């Protein structure tokens, strides 16, 4: 039986009996800063130390000393806090920064703290190293920022600062994360007469549809709300009900990984995709496990790791049930891995193999995973790989075909394809066409906050430098420069 869904309890004091917690001194040292962040996450989730202790099974006094900065927390304690509080790796990354020698003055700043690796080697590039992102509170929003050396990277700005002066309209539908329920209560998710699984699946479909219109930054807190709520609900059910909740939580974790991937935070994307893979083994859905393996290959391709992209995709294809689209999905992502290695023959062979697998699919599939895969999807990925291999004219033609065939509502995907088409035209030495299409992609990139779009446009900015006196190129570069923040 499903338990009644009721409201969550209010916040109580540090010791669980309502007393005022000790004042913290986060700017005293990096250790104190980390402790304050650990408490901030806990209090935001409306958990006392006692209730969190019951979840993570650590010594109560040790947890208190760590939060007050009196004792350095172990990596395992920080990971336990991060997992139990749904921090998405934020606390783990903060501890790693501290261990690397970052000081309090850097930790507490919202602008770019330090330079790091970046994708392109030109004037403007988009950083692909999560360590360059300044960490903020639990309500951080990633925004593009131009550094003093001309690069563009994504940094995390506290939501209250963002709403206060940088763009309240851009996050209009975003809400604060749902406080985790206590062990005795549950968040109010649905009316008692509704099936919770059906309700959660409906929420997931709405989030997916909204992503293509509004981009990932507004939706990541919403996904994490559901993961937190499902985790709380599972404490009160058993048997098939608990298994169903584990399955839907796995689906939300995979979706969270995708949103972070599109937002350009590859470390967070890896974290949530790995969590989804781990949970999928207990969810009783082998197709879901294969799909997540394929998604790990796609993520590796975005991170320009060809070996991982190929190996994980091959594992997914070998595990996929015959005559489902999942094997074709995996083969598609593995093909781009070959392109990243510069293997043109292997790339084209892999795409042909993906289409062969697609055409062998059972017309009445027994799984919904990968049902969106069709020849057009494979062709647009082939175009991206052709661009990576240097066949820019064929790539531009492929992207234009894909853009013309996109159904209504695929707003963000249109922006991604436009940005990649613009890059292909730049590679073909057609600067005016590249700049014009780049401007169109930029309007969608700034609207949706898609780092995938901005990554391509940062590379485009670099590729167009040799034509910077051309009016259309100058217009594009000025618009790109105006659309991002600048390092303080």
Image: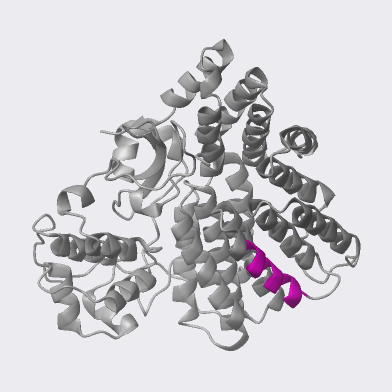
Q: Is residue 371 left or right of residue 244?
A: right
Q: Is residue 69 left or right of residue 82?
A: left
Which is the main secondary structure of the residues drawn in magenta?
helix
Rendering quarter of residue 293: bottom right
Task: Give residue 208's position: percent from left, percent from top.
Answer: 62, 52
Instruction: Give the residue at the far bottom of this rendering.
Output: 239
Residue positioned 85% across, 64% down in the render: 357
User: Observer-nearest residue: 81 or 385?
Assistant: 385
Residue positioned 68% across, 54% down in the render: 336
As for residue 167 lying within the magenta part, the answer is no
**Tag count:** 0
Q: Is residue 364 above or below residue 481?
A: below
Rendering quarter of residue 268: bottom left
Magenta residues span 309-320
Question: Quadrant of the image for the N terminus?
Answer: bottom right
Task: Give residue 284's position: percent from left, percent from top.
Answer: 66, 82
Q: Is residue 271 left or right of residue 395?
A: left
Q: Is residue 360 above or below residue 216?
A: below
């Amino acid at each position: 039986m499903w338990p009644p869904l009721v409201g969550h309890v209010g916040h109580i004091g540090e010791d669980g009996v309502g007393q005022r917690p000790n004042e913290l001194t986060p700017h005293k040292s990096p250790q104190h800063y980390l402790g304050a962040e650990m408490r901030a996450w806990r209090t935001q989730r409306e958990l006392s130390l006692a209730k969190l202790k019951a979840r993570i099974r650590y010594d109560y006094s040790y947890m208190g000393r760590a939060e007050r900065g009196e004792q350095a927390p172990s990596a395992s304690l920080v990971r336990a806090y991060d997992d139990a509080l749904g921090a998405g790796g934020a606390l783990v990354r903060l501890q790693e920064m501290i261990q690397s020698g970052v000081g309090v003055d850097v930790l507490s700043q919202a602008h770019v703290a330090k330079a790091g690796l970046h994708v392109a080697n030109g004037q403007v590039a988009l950083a692909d190293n999560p360590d360059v992102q300044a960490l903020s509170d639990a309500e951080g929003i990633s925004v593009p920022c131009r550094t003093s050396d001309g690069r563009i990277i994504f940094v995390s700005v506290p939501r209250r600062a963002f709403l206060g002066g940088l763009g309240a309209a851009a996050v209009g539908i975003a809400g604060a994360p749902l406080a985790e329920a206590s062990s005795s209560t549950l968040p109010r998710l649905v009316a008692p007469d509704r099936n919770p699984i059906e309700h959660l699946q409906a929420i997931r479909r709405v989030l997916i549809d909204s992503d293509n219109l509004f981009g990932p930054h507004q939706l990541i807190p919403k996904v994490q709300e559901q993961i937190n709520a499902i985790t709380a609900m599972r404490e009160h059910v058993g048997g098939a009900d608990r298994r169903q909740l584990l399955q839907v939580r796995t689906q939300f974790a995979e979706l969270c990984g995708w949103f972070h991937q599109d937002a350009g935070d590859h470390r967070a994307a890896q974290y949530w995709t790995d969590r989804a893979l781990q949970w999928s083994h207990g969810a009783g859905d082998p197709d879901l496990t294969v799909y997540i393996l394929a998604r790990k290959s796609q993520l590796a391709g975005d991170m320009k790791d060809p070996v991982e992209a190929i190996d994980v995709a091959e594992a997914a294809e070998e595990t996929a049930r015959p005559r489902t689209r999942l094997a074709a999905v995996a083969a598609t992502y593995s093909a781009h891995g070959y392109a990243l290695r510069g293997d043109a023959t292997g790339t084209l062979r892999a795409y042909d193999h993906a289409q062969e697998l697609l055409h062998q699919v059972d017309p009445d599939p027994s799984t919904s995973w990968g049902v969106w895969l069709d020849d057009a999807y494979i062709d647009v990925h082939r175009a991206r790989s052709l661009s990576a291999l240097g066949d820019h004219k064929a790539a531009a033609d492929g992207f234009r075909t894909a853009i013309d065939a996109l159904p209504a509502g695929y707003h963000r995907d249109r922006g991604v394809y436009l940005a990649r088409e613009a890059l292909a035209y730049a590679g073909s030495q057609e600067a005016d066409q590249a700049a014009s299409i780049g401007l169109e992609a930029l309007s969608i990139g700034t609207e949706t906050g898609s780092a995938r779009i901005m990554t391509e446009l940062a590379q485009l900015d670099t590729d167009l430098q040799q034509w910077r006196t051309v009016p259309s190129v100058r217009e594009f570069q000025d618009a790109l420069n105006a659309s991002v923040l600048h390092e303080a």
